Image (spheres, helix red, strand yellow):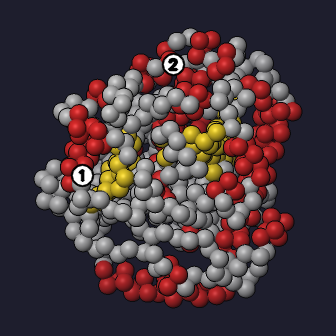
Amino acid sequence: MAVSALTGFSVVSLLSLGYLSWDLMSPVPNQMENESVKNFRDRSPVGSPHPPHIIFIMTDDQGFNDIGYHGSDIQTPTLDKLAADGVKLENYYIQPICTPSRSQLITGRYQIHTGLQHSIIRPRQPNCLPLDQVTLPQRLQEVGYSTHMVGKWHLGFYKKECLPTRRGFHTYFGSLTGSVDYYTYKTCDGPGMCGFDLHEGESVAWGQGGKYSTHLYTQRVRKILASHDPLAQPLFIYLSFQAVHTPLQSPREYIYPYRGLGNVARRKYAAMVSAVDEAVKNVTYALRKYGYYRNSVIIFSTDNGGQPISGGNNWPLRGRKGTYWEGGVRGLGFVHSPLLRRKRRVSKALVHITDWYPTLVGLAGGNASLSEGLDGYDVWGAISEGKESPRLEILHNIDPLYNPARSGSLQSGYGIWNTAVQASIRAGDWKLLTGDPGYGDWTPPQVLPGFPGSWWNLERQLEPHKSVWLFNISRDPYERYDLAEQRPDVVKELLARLVSYNRTSIPVRYPSEDPRGNPGLNGGAWGPWVGDDEEERWDGLYHKKRKDVKKIYKLSKTKSFFRRLNTKMMSNQI
């Protein structure tokens, strides 16, 4: 958002938010005014005569401390080398869970503008990425790209119109749900709700299971590269690895180098990351072998923070997957390309996952301004040339359905905003959180063999009566010093920004589960169950059912017992 668009704000308040500096107080042009409106030759990076081949690689649940160049105990030589020779994005933000990150990548819009601001799309929900959205691959098709997706979709599939091949991809090979077995490709959504989930285009890929998914998806990408002419047509490949999401599975040879890790979950998880590292090496090799590399742009990104209980780690950041602390929303990311004008550097430019949409459309020679209402910015100049990022703020989310904070109220929000609502925004140097942001702990690297309860509480801060937090993220990236009480002026400004964003939001789309989605009723596989001509009956705003607190407490104690028991058993498995 341009500074000129921040109507009603004083210069002093803009300075306090970090939008302006005393030395430079000029407006930043928005995405409608950027270079993407020019023809391709003028827009081309380093004057390339042909649109670049774009390879977007996304990993699932890989934590901030789960890559070699962040000092991890996990070995990632390929990713380290690609990042070192390219541009590391060290001020890069994603969403805290799967579906939101993917939807924002594909649409260039915040969740509040697609109706997907609550949770994820579940397998039996009659829900998917809104059909009125023009997707990134559709825009790339319009400018002549051959588009292909391999891997995890997780953007809904209840009708065929929702499938990847109907949303801009010429070909698709992968799984539609959020998590499957890495070998059998089966997944369950409750007792008796199990089915096969591996698809080739719009058909079930029966008979192609049995091979580890990271290897299977890499093999498919190599096949696409081998069968395409790099000089005839530009290529866009979205490689969305299932790894390193649970279940924790990997071939045995990847586990052996980590046999010294006492924590079993961390050991398996590290093996899965190493398998991904090798897969990226094989994809990069294929790009060179088949003549794509010199005119290619490789983008690597995670979809959300790591989950420590499943082996991931975000140290030294606060929080984890599913939270709005930095550990949940600050992502791993880098760009590797011979077309970069300034290589081998670390970029602190503010970048959000919605920015890839206009950035890649611009790189392809398209006009991103044709897509009205984008929340993303073209950040290629910031990445390739080291220019200032046009992005000044990020709306992490506003989720009106998430469990409201008991201590939150309109009064706590100075009469501006109800702080019971889960929301978070980053503006300049400042970050504000309201409601319940999720567990706010700092989880150190997992070096212990098990998960004793005291270990999880090493640095956990319990603040049951708080509903507002404020941090200067530039000075305090680990969110250890809450300044909400010291800087009520900044809190009020950011609460007003939340109100402004909320006025533009659309209703939450989170329908109840449809029993017809049971794979047992659809030949044993997950897939569309509603006809394209059938009238939609989703009930709009979803209201959670009130749960029996006593039953939940009893169930929680039971789960805790079995988790401790299972931990002891897991420690002896490998």
Q: Residue at x 32, y 53 (%)?
A: 432
Question: Which residue is located at x 53 percent, y 81 percent?
Answer: 455
Does residue 516 appear left or right of residue 213 in this picture? Answer: left
Residue 572 percent coordinates (x, y): 73, 85
Question: The C terminus lies in which quarter of the figure?
Answer: bottom right
* Disc number placed over residue 18 in the picture, else none: none
Q: Disc 1 designates what residue? A: 491
Say if residue 217 shows up in the picture: no
Q: Nearer the viewer, mark 1 or mark 2?
A: 1
The one nearer the camera, 351 or 155, is: 351
Task: Classify mark 1: helix, strand or loop.
Answer: helix
Using the image, determine if residue 61 lies above or below residue 459: above
What residue is drawn where x is 78% and y is 30%? 293
Q: Residue at x 75, y 59 (%)?
A: 75
**For the residue carrying disc 2, how many other residues have a C-alpha within 10 Å: few (<14), some (14-19), or many (20+)?**
many
Question: What's the distance in space between the residues labelled 1 and 2, CA to CA?
Answer: 35 Å
Residue most extreme to the front: 23
Circle 2 — which element?
helix
Check the picture and name the quadrant holding the N terminus.
top left
Categorize mark 1 by other alpha carbons within 10 Å: few (<14), some (14-19), many (20+).
many
Q: Which mark is residue 36?
A: 2
Can residue 191 be seen in this snapshot?
yes
Question: Three-letter amino acid code at disc 1?
Answer: Val
Q: Position of residue 17 (x, y in %)?
A: 30, 43
Give x and y (percent) for residue 545: 30, 67
482 versus 291 height, above or below: below
Q: Amino acid at mark 2?
A: Ser
